[in-house]
Image (tube, rainbow, N blue to C red):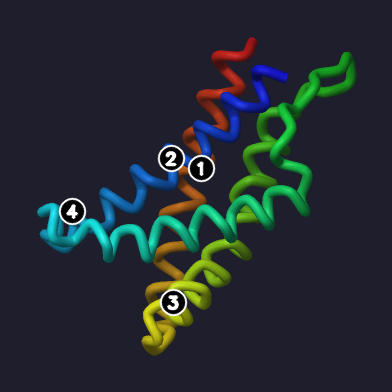
């Protein structure tokens, strides 16, 4: 049970870090951008946890004798799930801000979030072993 909470906390922290990196690439790291960061990270977390739940990614993977490729399969599923969660987050963000939904932002957010989550989940699997 404890590892489930570590997994969920790590997911949220990873999404926060990805958001901070995204804002930093645009030179928007001052405290005045904090509310805007929240309008990105909150929809991203909501959409990730909804999609991850649907994909069964909120419970730690249980190794079995036949699970030689468990890490690759799990990490691949994480990346695939983020390809759905990213666009959903952009739609939720657009609704919150009452702003247009920019497709390239959805692509970039999905790709960078998938990459970050795959790194985190790989580290999680390595540390769990």
Mark earlier in primary sequence (3, 4) = 4
Q: Secondary structure at mark 4?
A: helix
Q: CA distance from mark 2 to mark 4?
A: 15 Å
- The answer to the question of whether label 1 and label 2 lie on touching residues, with beta carbons closer than 8 A, is yes
Q: CA distance from mark 4 to mark 1?
A: 19 Å
Residue beneath disc 4:
24
Closer mark to the observer between disc 3 and disc 1: 3
Q: Is residue 121 left or right of residue 30?
A: right
Closer mark to the observer between disc 1 and disc 2: 2
Q: CA distance from mark 1 to mark 2?
A: 7 Å
The tag on residue 19 is none
Q: CA distance from mark 3 to mark 1?
A: 24 Å
Quadrant of the snapshot with the C terminus: top right
Mark earlier in primary sequence (3, 1) = 3
- The answer to the question of whether label 2 and label 4 lie on touching residues, with beta carbons closer than 8 A, is no
Q: CA distance from mark 3 to mark 4?
A: 22 Å
- The answer to the question of whether label 4 and label 1 lie on touching residues, with beta carbons closer than 8 A, is no
Q: Secondary structure at mark 3?
A: helix
Residue beneath disc 2:
14
Residue at (48, 35) in percent of width and height = 119
Mark earlier in primary sequence (2, 4) = 2
Residue 10 x, y percent position in the rendering: 50, 32
Residue 47 x, y percent position in the rendering: 59, 60
Residue at (45, 70) in percent of width and height = 107
Q: Toward the viewer: 38 or 89?
A: 38
The tag on residue 96 is 3
Q: Secondary structure at mark 1?
A: helix
Assess disc 2: are there few (<14), some (14-19) or many (≥20) residues with their C-alpha within 10 Å of its C-alpha: many
Q: CA distance from mark 2 to mark 3?
A: 22 Å
Q: Secondary structure at mark 2?
A: helix
Residue beneath disc 1:
117
């Amino acid at each position: 049970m404890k590892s489930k909470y570590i997994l969920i906390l790590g997911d949220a922290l990873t999404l926060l870090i990805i958001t901070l990196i995204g804002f930093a690439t645009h030179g928007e790291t001052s405290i005045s951008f904090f509310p805007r960061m929240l309008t990105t990270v909150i929809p991203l977390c909501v959409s990730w946890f909804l999609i991850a739940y649907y994909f069964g990614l909120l419970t730690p993977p249980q190794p079995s004798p036949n699970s030689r490729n468990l890490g690759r399969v799990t990490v691949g599923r994480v990346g695939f799930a983020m390809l759905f969660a990213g666009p959903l987050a952009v739609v939720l963000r657009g609704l919150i801000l009452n702003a247009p939904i920019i497709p390239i932002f959805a692509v970039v957010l999905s790709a960078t979030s998938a990459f970050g989550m795959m790194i985190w989940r790989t580290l999680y699997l390595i540390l769990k072993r």
